[in-house]
Amino acid sequence: MRLSVSNLGHLYHKGSAPVFRCLDYAFEPGSLTAVTGPSGCGKSTLLYVLALMLTPWEGSVDWNGVNVHNLTDGERAHLRAKHVGFVFQDAVLDLSRTAEDNVVEAAWLAGLRPEVARPRARELMERFGVGDMSAHRPGEVSGGQAQRIALCRALVKNPDILFADEPSGNLDVSSAQIVWEALAACAAQGATVIVATHDDVRAAGAAQHLRLEP
Amino acid sequence: MIARPPARFFLADAVHRFRAPFTPTLISLLVLAGATIAIFATTGIALATQQATLDRINSPQGRLITVADTEGDAGFSSESVEVIAGLSGVDWVFAVGPALDASAKAIPGGQTVPARLYYGRLPPVLTVATATDAMAPGMALAGPGVAATLGLKDGLGTVEAPGRSGTVVGRFTPGAPLNELGADVLIAPQGEGRILTLWVEVQDVSQLAVVESGVRASVIAAHPGALHVDTSIELTQLSADITAELAKSATLTVSALLAAVFVLVGAVEYARVASTTRDIGRRRALGATRSAIVLGVLATAGLSALVGTLIGVMVGAIVTFVSAGTAPRWVFCVGIVILMVIAALAGAVAPALRASRLDPVAILRVP
């Protein structure tokens, strides 16, 4: 799915300084875009706007040419459920559910039947080395494992667009490597992958690179 | 195509939220169970007692109208029986004349028993055992043990009283309210005669007042003012008054408890939402619609309310049974469950709407 933004700007409160403004950019399908910039430049905010969790102050966000911010809240939620995978900076898992149930939850919200969702969740968890953790709760796994579980949750519905907000910021080298390889593989399969990161080395290897300035 | 989570997702999620976090669930269970038990301990017991009273009033004894010529000088005619039997709401009418001393014809100077002419069809409260299909004039029935007292062989034979005679063709066993006839011989009369006591059984106690008026207007007697009409109508009226008072009191009690459930469940669900904002934000970010969030909160509240109320109903039914000696009607139990769940769901609406309006970015964003 091709994402493009036009004259995009956002501020959190009327009268406050804009987080970013006059942004024009196109995120191509099948490519991994690294969004970089110093802290406070609006990397995470841009991802939330692109993922339809925030309504921009000005400008438009188009998904395959459709201005998605003109849609209703319910329609945007359905688009998020069906087409968007999101890896948050700190995993954001449900502490009261098992790792597998955390992954399956996203599939259910996407409308997948449990008999489809569970095998897919287990397959992904095996692939990312957290298969043994499926019955564990998030409080019983390490940060790296939690982030890999969050990655499985983002991938379980085969998203057309995958966002990752500093996905390796808190991880050791090997866990970070696994996450980045997964993001690249997702892009290679045709998804539009957009990653906010401080890691200039990784960003340099990305197919597209958007640098935000304060 | 729009993605929608399957219905069982909400059910499974409600069951999960029921268990974790359990503190709000426990409070909700206690509130619902406590309120339900309170309803049973007040309204339930009152209704059960009232129902038992109504059942007693609506017994054959309670539905009875007795017209008696106590002094024997009213000229109370047996023609009254046919007229009263034609009144609407009358179940049966039965009357007897004055008692005559009767003895077995075959045993001159033998033991005597009271014999009475009877009028009207034999009522169902008289259990009759006879080989005869219908009682013809002059046929008689003996009460329990009366035939033996008279010395009738095989319980059958002719009895004679001054100016009357009858052939005993079987026996009868009286039930309430005709137990007083148990020592008598009842003789089917030839034609009309004078009666002393007339009983009218009304079909339903609610018709008692109307039928009583009809009976008073229908009696055929030379001096109707000398007749004494006796009913349990005052008791019925008293019961109706008590019922009305109980209904008012029950409505007030139940309304107050439902309002308490509404407020307390609302507070509990607010607390539950406040303690799970991160989960709600995560779910919104993953694509849950606002309506899905509302449904999730309501499903959890509804499940807690249902379980709490069912616990309350079970305990309340036992309390009612122990206190009033009778179990509450199932309609009352089902009604309470429905009302409680509705009150709880209504209380959970505001927290559910608040949950649906939470901003996922504000919740999930890492500073």
Image: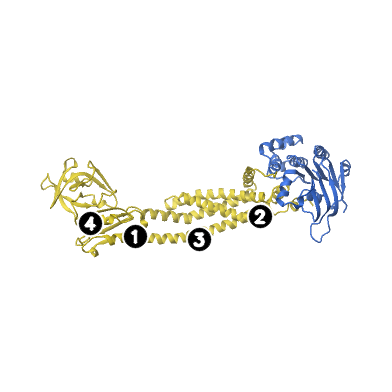
Chain colours: A blue, B yellow
The crowd level at tag 1 (other Cα within 10 Å; few <14, some 14-19, many 20+) is few
At label 2, the amino acid type is: Leu
Q: Quadrant of the N terminus of chain B?
A: top right
Query: Are the residues tagged 3 and 1 within 8 Å (C-beta)?
Result: no
Q: Is residue B286 visible?
A: no
Query: Which residue in the structure is indicated by mark 1?
Result: B210
Q: Could you tell me residue B309's position as x and y percent? A: 54, 50
Q: Residues within 10 Å of mark 4 (few under 14, many from 20)?
A: some
Q: Earlier in the sequence, mark 3 or mark 2?
A: 3
The image quarter containing residue B207 is bottom left
Q: CA distance from mark 3 to mark 1?
A: 32 Å
Residue at disc 4, secondary structure? helix
Report the disc number at residue B79.
Answer: 4
Q: Nearer the viewer, mark 3 or mark 1?
A: 1
Q: Which mark is residue B353?
A: 2
Q: Disc 4 marks which amino acid?
A: Glu
Give above or below for B79 relative to A105. Answer: below
Count neighbours of disc 2 (C-alpha within 10 A) and say few if under 14, some if 14 to 19, many if 20 or more.
Answer: some
SS label for mark 3: helix
Q: Is residue A38 left or right of residue A100?
A: right
